[in-house]
């Protein structure tokens, strides 16, 4: 059982991260500009308002795709696995989920969690001697099962035997997951690390910090393909681009916090 302050600290980190996401920053700038206008500081108010709109437009443009690519291109995909031998484990990091009784696992996992699980199962099938380790706890006592249990059930439904699956259901974030895997796997294991491509640089940094050298197996690349870039419609500002900017922003903030902490 975790102490209450751990959940409080985790919630605080999530809150701070959410407040520094692009759209909240835009809102703060925009409201600040309106406040300046109401305070009869018309020139400063207009500058801040227009600056906030330019900020939002830039984040909604294909520029966000370029920023996301800086993260997603750091580690190549693990499409060809023929050169790998002696893999001890396939580790699938947790993401998001929402328990929905009566609905299949695919409806309870977020898109990122579902894709991570699918990649983990693919690699577990390719390496039948490896354990499939699924990770993810819960800071919400009202949720019936931590994420790791949901991932394990999904893996079983996709054909992975129960005795091959290891459930790690205490970690609340990537740093927790890295420490848990160091305790579970011991020194110098050969294992594959599965997470989304944008999250992989930060995940690898956490695992390196605890002395582990995983083989990165990134998935869910969101950066536009060459074909998509050739379509003029892709250059129109869109909510999808804003979402990409949010992912990149969050991961860069995480990397900065990790660098400052260590």
Image (spheres, grey):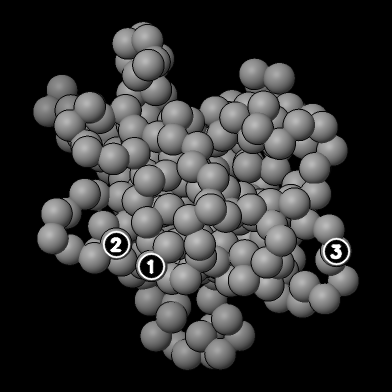
Q: CA distance from mark 3 to mark 1?
A: 26 Å
Query: Of label 2 and label 1, which has the lower sequence position?
Result: 2
Instruction: Label 3, secondary structure: give it.
Output: loop
Q: CA distance from mark 2 to mark 1?
A: 9 Å
Check the picture and name the quadrant holding the C terminus. top right
Check the picture and name the quadrant holding the N terminus. top left
* Residue carrying label 2: 105
- What's the residue at 56%, 90% (across, down)? 227
For residue 121, what is the image quadrant? bottom right
* Residue carrying label 1: 157
The image position of residue 35, as x and y in percent, is: 18, 28
For residue 19, what is the image quadrant? top left
Q: Up-down: is 34 above or below 1?
A: below
- What's the residue at 63%, 42% (across, down)? 203
Residue located farthest toward the front when viewing the structure as drawn: 163
Q: Are marks 2 and 1 in contact (CB under 8 Å)?
A: yes
* Residue carrying label 3: 85
Query: Of label 2 and label 3, which has the lower sequence position?
Result: 3
């Amino acid at each position: 059982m975790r102490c209450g302050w751990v959940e409080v600290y985790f919630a605080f980190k999530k809150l701070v991260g959410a407040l520094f996401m692009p759209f909240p920053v835009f809102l703060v700038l925009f409201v600040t500009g309106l406040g300046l206008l109401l305070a009869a500081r018309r020139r400063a108010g207009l500058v801040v308002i227009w600056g906030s709109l330019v900020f939002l437009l830039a984040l909604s443009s294909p520029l966000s795709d370029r920023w996301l690519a800086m993260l997603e291109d750091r580690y190549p995909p693990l499409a060809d696995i023929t050169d790998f031998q002696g893999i001890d484990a396939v580790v699938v990091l947790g993401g998001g989920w929402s328990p929905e009784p009566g609905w299949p696992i695919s409806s309870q996992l977020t898109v990122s969690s579902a894709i991570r699980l699918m990649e983990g199962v693919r690699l577990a099938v390719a390496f039948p001697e490896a354990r499939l380790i699924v990770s993810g706890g819960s800071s919400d006592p009202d949720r019936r099962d931590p994420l790791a249990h949901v991932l394990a059930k999904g893996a079983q439904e996709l054909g992975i035997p129960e005795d091959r699956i290891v459930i790690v259901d205490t970690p609340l974030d990537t740093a927790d997951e890295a420490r848990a895997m160091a305790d579970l796997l011991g020194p110098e294991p050969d294992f594959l690390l599965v997470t989304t491509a944008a999250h992989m640089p930060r995940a690898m940094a956490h695992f390196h910090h605890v002395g582990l050298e995983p083989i990165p197996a990134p998935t869910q690349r969101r950066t536009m393909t060459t074909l998509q870039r050739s379509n003029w419609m892709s250059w129109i500002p869109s909510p999808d681009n804003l979402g990409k900017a949010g992912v990149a922003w969050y991961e860069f903030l995480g990397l900065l916090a990790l660098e400052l902490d260590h």
